[in-house]
Image (spheres, rainbow, N blue to C red):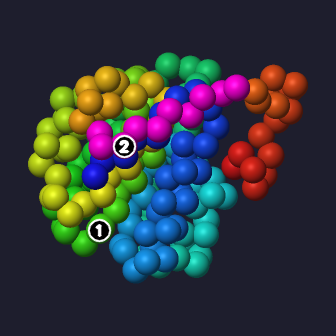
Amino acid sequence: MIHIYTGNGKGKTTAAIGLAVRAAGSGMKVFFGQFVKGMAYNEVSIFNEQMPQIDHELFGRTCFINRDPEPEDYKAAKAGLRKVKNIIQSGQYSLIVLDELNIALYYKLIALEDILKLINELPRDLELVITGRYAPQELIDKADLVTEMKEVKHYYKQDIKARKGIEF
């Protein structure tokens, strides 16, 4: 099955982490790749320290919310996609999470056609989760499950900054 968690609300990566932990707890081998992100947030430190069933890798450099992507950002995303293709072909994982892939697509760090081809060639027994705002309609059409996180109210609007253990 293909899952997509998208939308402007909080919780996309958190939902994917929850699913990864559930899968690992049932004995499944999980790969959790994060596009665009270049820093391991606290949410994934538990993978490295306490969950050997979950392999984690970053496919980004730094957050570029306040700037345009640089050539190195494109290179990092493309290298990440090559790695993901090899991981899929290895057959050793039951669940693969591609966190913030939709953002990489939105900023054209990766071509949508490459992702659609990857999806069309997935083994039938592989579960794939894609997160990030701005999921393209073509991915939504391919997915078996789509959840849109909708922001109704957020404390950021009260100028409350990201808090350790909650947002990072």
Residue 123 visible (yes or no): yes
> Nearest the camera: 121 or 34?
121
Dot 1, how many residues are within 10 Å of its Cα: few (below 14), some (14-19), or many (20+)? Answer: some
- Give the quarter of the image for residue 103: top left
Q: Secondary structure at mark 1?
A: loop
In the depicted structure, whether residue 133 falls above or below residue 93: above
x%, y% of residue 142? 24, 36
Q: Residue at x 24, y 60 (%)?
A: 126
In the depicted structure, whether residue 19 falls above or below residue 101: below
Q: Secondary structure at mark 2?
A: strand
- For residue 32: magenta? no
x%, y% of residue 166? 75, 50
Q: Residue at x 86, y 26 (%)?
A: 159
- Which of disc 2 and disc 1 is earlier in sequence? 1
- Amino acid type assigned to the residue bearing label 2 in the image: Leu
Q: Residue at x 17, y 52 (%)?
A: 122
Identify the main secondary structure in magenta. loop
x%, y% of residue 39? 58, 49
> Nearest the camera: 166 or 23?
23
Q: Which residues are magenta?
A: 143-152
Residue 93 numbered tag: 1
Q: Image check: 67 left or right of 5?
A: right
Provide the residue designation for mark 2. 145
Residues at discs 1 and 2 in contact (Cβ within 8 Å): no
- Amino acid type assigned to the residue bearing label 1 in the image: Tyr
Q: Image check: 145 left or right of 113?
A: right
x%, y% of residue 45? 61, 65
Dot 2, how many residues are within 10 Å of its Cα: few (below 14), some (14-19), or many (20+)? Answer: few
> Nearest the camera: 102 or 86?
102
